[in-house]
Amino acid sequence: MTAGSVIQAVVIRFRLYECRPGLNALCGVSTMPSGSADISSILDRILDAATDNLRIAKILVQMGLDPDNVTYDAIFNRLLEIFIHNITLANLFAAVGAGFFVATLLMRTMVPLRVANMIGCALFAVFGALTANVATFLLYLLLLPINALRLRQMLKLVKKARHATEGDMSIEWLKPFMTERKYRRGDTLFKLGDPAQEMLLTVTGKFLVKEINVEIGPGALMGELGFLTPDNRRTGTIECIEDGQVLTITYDRLLEIYFQDPQFGYYFLVLTSQRLLQNIDRLQKQLATERAATTNRIA
């Protein structure tokens, strides 16, 4: 073969290679990359396997049932057989623990909920130990001290709330959040209907609620009812009748502490309730006195 014929053969092959996509298209041959064909075949195989595994007959066989003889008795007997086969000490602990966890969903108060959760965690930890399941054992063993800590905090909060209802709670811890202010005899702290923006704690001196003629001494809160009124207005007029000192705190700051410390929030509600009850009792006594005076005048 001469050099010219060799070069001619190479050129012909090159041209045929360039025209190959067009020839393939004319002949109906797909030019899709082989990778796409492989992915398509893999997806087809996955769908076929899933369809085969989800066939009812195959599921029944996996459950140990005869697809040609599915009756209620056969299902019941199979379930009973599975139940009896799985009666072990470890599964018994797990079943009781699951019962306690379900009970937590039905409880409305936190203390019994935490107790039931701790019991459930302990039972599941035992289940993990008996079945040599390290992950289950460590998980529920870790949940035990967390629930114990939350339970202790809750019990402590309940104890403080009970002390608050008995009037034993001190608000000395509130003083660092308050601002000092001094008043002289004859000064008016605020008047009935004034906008209310702060609560006061008396330190020294004496103050008079003019509408009901009641004296307030050291260690008493004033202006707390304005915090609860819808329009934040003063419910009385307070005048200084003896030089004294008070500590004040704004309602905005008080609201922050109210939500951050449930103990103070509960105490504040008890305090305002007691104040309202005292006012009602005082009004009833005044009304009774006026009625008695009217009766005597008529007689």
Image: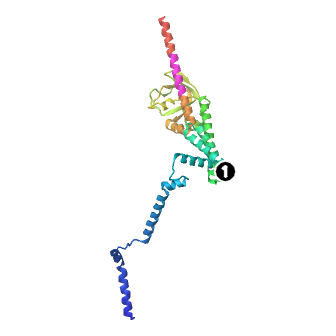
Q: How crowded is mark 1: few (under 14 residues within 10 Å), some or many (20 or more)?
A: some
Q: Identify the amino acid type marked 1.
A: Leu
Image quadrant containing the N terminus = bottom left
Residue that extends furthest to the bottom in the rendered view of this protein: 2
Q: Seen from this angle, which residue lies furthest front?
A: 69
Q: Which residue lies furthest to the left in this view?
A: 26
Prevailing secondary structure class for the magenta stretch in the rendered image: helix
Identify the residue under disc 1. Answer: 130
Image vertical order of residue 298 relative to residue 266, above or below? above
Name the residue at 48% across, 54% down: 56
| Residue 233, position as x, y percentages in the image | 45, 30
Q: Is residue 299 above or below residue 143?
A: above
**Label 1 element class:** helix
Q: Nearer the viewer, residue 218 or 272?
A: 272
Which residue is depicted at the point 43% across and 71% down? 34
Q: Can residue 3 be seen in this view?
A: yes
Percent position of residue 69, x then y: 51, 51
Question: Is residue 69 shown in magenta?
Answer: no
Q: Give the range drawn in magenta.
A: 273-286
Could you tell me residue 46's position as x and y percent? 47, 62
Residue 298 position, x and y percent, is 47, 6
